[in-house]
Image (cartoon, grey):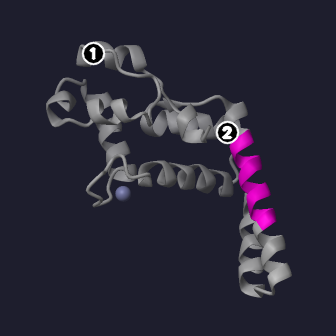
Amino acid sequence: MAITDKIYLKNHRQLSSQLETNLPKSAFSGATLDLLFQSENLANLDDATQERVLDFATDFLDCDCDSNPHCGHPERKFMRYLLELREQGLGPDAIVDVMGDDYMLYAYSGDVLSFLDQSVRTLEAVEELAEVEGYREAADEAHERKRRLS
Ligand SMILES: [Zn+2]
């Protein structure tokens, strides 16, 4: 399971009652994205929640794909967001706190930790492969990105 399958709506119960529907807990489930971002639904949310939901839409659902938000870009952008927080020096617990403040989302810090570890291992594999194949620049870039994550 991808980390984005383990990102949850922090105020899930409150959102469900404001929308008078049973919203899935997972933030990136197709049904959540559909329900939450229909404009007639947005109007039913209180101001603070609406602001966070709109921030989320602006930051992650802003591509022009016909199939948006089901095109895969929102998930990829969110993973990049997590990696950027890590590059700023935040640990899993702090990352969970920040996503709560930014977007009213939460995750288990153990899941965030696994995701970060997996990302470092992926970069390691890329670096090794690039070295073997003689792609010096790609190897250096993977090395540098790995360094910034650790
Ligand atoms: Zn897209």
* Amino acid, disc 2: Val
**118 part of magenta stretch:** yes
Rendered position, 109 above or below 141: above
Q: Which residue is mark 2?
A: 112
Rendered position, 86 above or below 50: below
**Residue shown at 62% from the left, 41% from the top:** 95
Residue in front for this viewpoint, 31 or 145: 31
**Residue shown at 81% from the left, 87% from the top:** 134
State which region is magenta. 114-125
Picture coordinates of residue 98, whole percent (x, y): 55, 39
Q: Is residue 150 visible?
A: no
Q: In the figure, is residue 43 to the left or right of 46?
A: left
Q: In the figure, is residue 102 to the left or right of 82?
A: left
Picture coordinates of residue 24, whole percent (x, y): 41, 22
Q: Is residue 127 visible?
A: yes
Badge 2 element = helix
Badge 1 element = loop
**Residue shown at 73% from the left, 71% from the top:** 142
Picture coordinates of residue 22, whole percent (x, y): 33, 15
Q: Quadrant of residue 48?
A: top left
* Amino acid, disc 1: Thr
Q: Which residue is mark 1?
A: 21
**38 part of magenta stretch:** no
Q: CA distance from mark 1 to mark 2?
A: 29 Å
